[in-house]
Amino acid sequence: MIEILLVDDETYVTESLARTIPWEQMDIHKVYQASSAADALLILEEQSVDIVVTDIRMPVMDGLKLIETIGQRWPHIRCILLTGHSDFDYAKKAIQLQAFDYILKPVNDDEFIGCVSNAIESLKDEWSESDKYHQLLYSRKSDFTVLRANLLNELLLGRRLSSKTIKDKLNQYEIPLKMEEEAVMMLILHGKHFAAMDHHSVSLMEFAVGNIAEEVFTDDFHVWHSKAPHDCLVLIAQAKDQFIQERVRKEKLQENVRELQKHVGNYLKGDISVIITNWFQFPDELPSAYRSGLSSMFGNMFGDEAVVPVKSIESLYKPPTLIHLLESKQWEAARQKINDVLSDMEQTAYSREHLYEVLLSVTNAFMYIAHKQGHFIHEIDHAGMDFLMDRSIIRSPDSLRNWALSMLDKLKTELSANDEHTRSYIIKQVQEIVSNDLGHETSVKTIADRVYLHPVYLSKIYKAATGESLGDYIIRIRMERALYLLKNTNKKIYEITSELGYQNPQYFSKMFKKHYGLTPNEFRDN
């Protein structure tokens, strides 16, 4: 939400605007008023203002000088001029100072709303571009291996991304797969040789297997490989020649798989098994192909015949999806969705493959939200994902329900505690910054910059955590510091004013009296 400052030495102008304009409908949640440029600068130092509307004709410092100062100190703020003078010199000077717009007095409400609305849209566009820029910087600076793995994990676990987003990320991370073309997935499982290795050694071996696969498949296929959430290596391949006959494509794929197994045996002294899915449309059918591969993998582990995901469990995939509910922390709605899916199943003639389908979808959602928050499921519950060993979980809908709801409760407890810890840490940081630095640069904006949050979001979480706005907290700490300096030092009033970041002793005196009922001089005289 946006914050706006109205500046005019004729206070009836700002008071009228503050009362009559539908600010909340414009997404403006705070309206400040100042009767001089000096007061306006003090407010700007303490609050997170986004738009300033100022009169031109004001004593001491006029509106043009004010927006020039704002442009130097707070270049992100949009400035709009109010003036009763329509001559060209004012407009020309305003343009030179990069004012966003100007409005003639007397102010027409519709014109004012339109002008401020344009400034708001301009701000939102700038914030959007800034987000894209920082995302690009992050992408450039981060390890492509990690970024590729994160993207593949999101897609495998059913994260819904727009086609444009996926295409952009494929290009950014230099992944050679093409959108809307057929692909095949291979799940690579380690043999007994790898089972005896520690986690670090297994990770190195998986990296080596992936690199060998790229070399083996390079003549005929584009490939993308990564560690999958369910403790296996995933390899996605697309034929370089999309017009190749299906029979020839299948033969080449099987030939390359055999070559991969041979090289892993020769160079890594281990064996691997490879589960190959049916061909599917990339990336839309990627999650269902992954579930199909997992079903085959579990079937092999349990000695069952390979099972195919069931498409008849419609409520499982009906929006909002389980991933969406977990991502937005709608815990009760997530619990209800799991109950509804399994209750519907109990009303029909379900089979083991139905239970497999629900199990895989639920674990995918749990893994996705845990990984997104920087956790692994085994850290939340060491036995939580032992369904590979414990077949009782999929004995019946009721046993699956008990397991899923138990894991949901543990996930909720862990992630809620993590959110609370993060907020507490931010609040502590903010309070330390304010306590250690009460100079001119201490404001909601400068503090937000130091803790890498948007000022509006920082103000929101600070108010929610403490019940006091961040701007009010800064003022209160300044006043407490002023009280101490007045009582325990011989510093002059103007020296204390400057030390606390106030430029105007009269304004400081006004704020002090508002808090303690006495001016600084009256306090000392007592």
Image (cartoon, rainbow, N blue to C red):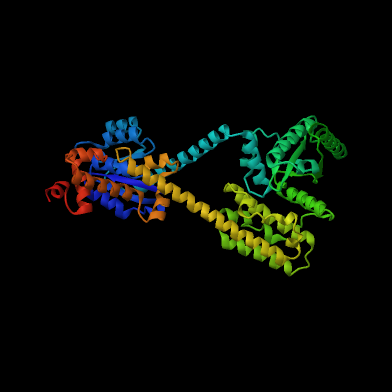
Residue at position x 66%, y 65% from top?
A: 340
Q: How many marks overall?
A: 0
3 on left or right of 312: left
Residue 91 position by quadrant: top left
Foreground residue, 512 or 37? 512
Residue 33 drawn above or below residue 76: below
Q: Nearer the viewer, residue 346 or 162?
A: 346
Q: Is residue 330 visible?
A: yes
145 displayed left or right of 441:
right
Place of residue 222 in the rendered image (x, y in percent of width and height, measured from the top left) = 75, 34
Q: In which quarter of the image is residue 448?
A: top left
Q: Residue at x 29, y 38 (%)?
A: 439
Q: In this view, does 133 lie to the left or right of 515?
A: right
- Of 34 and 306, nearer the camera is 306
Q: Specify whether 94 is left or right of 183.
A: left
Q: Is residue 503 visible from the viewing direction of this image?
A: no
Where in the figure is residue 262, as x and y percent of width and height?
84, 34
Q: Where is residue 179 in the image (x, y as percent from the top left)?
A: 70, 39
Residue 136, compared with residue 506, is above or below; it is above
> Residue shown at 76%/37% (left/top)?
238
Locate residue 392, reporting x and y percent.
75, 62
Q: Which residue is drawn at 64% across and 43% down?
A: 163
| Residue at the bottom extreme, as displayed | 347
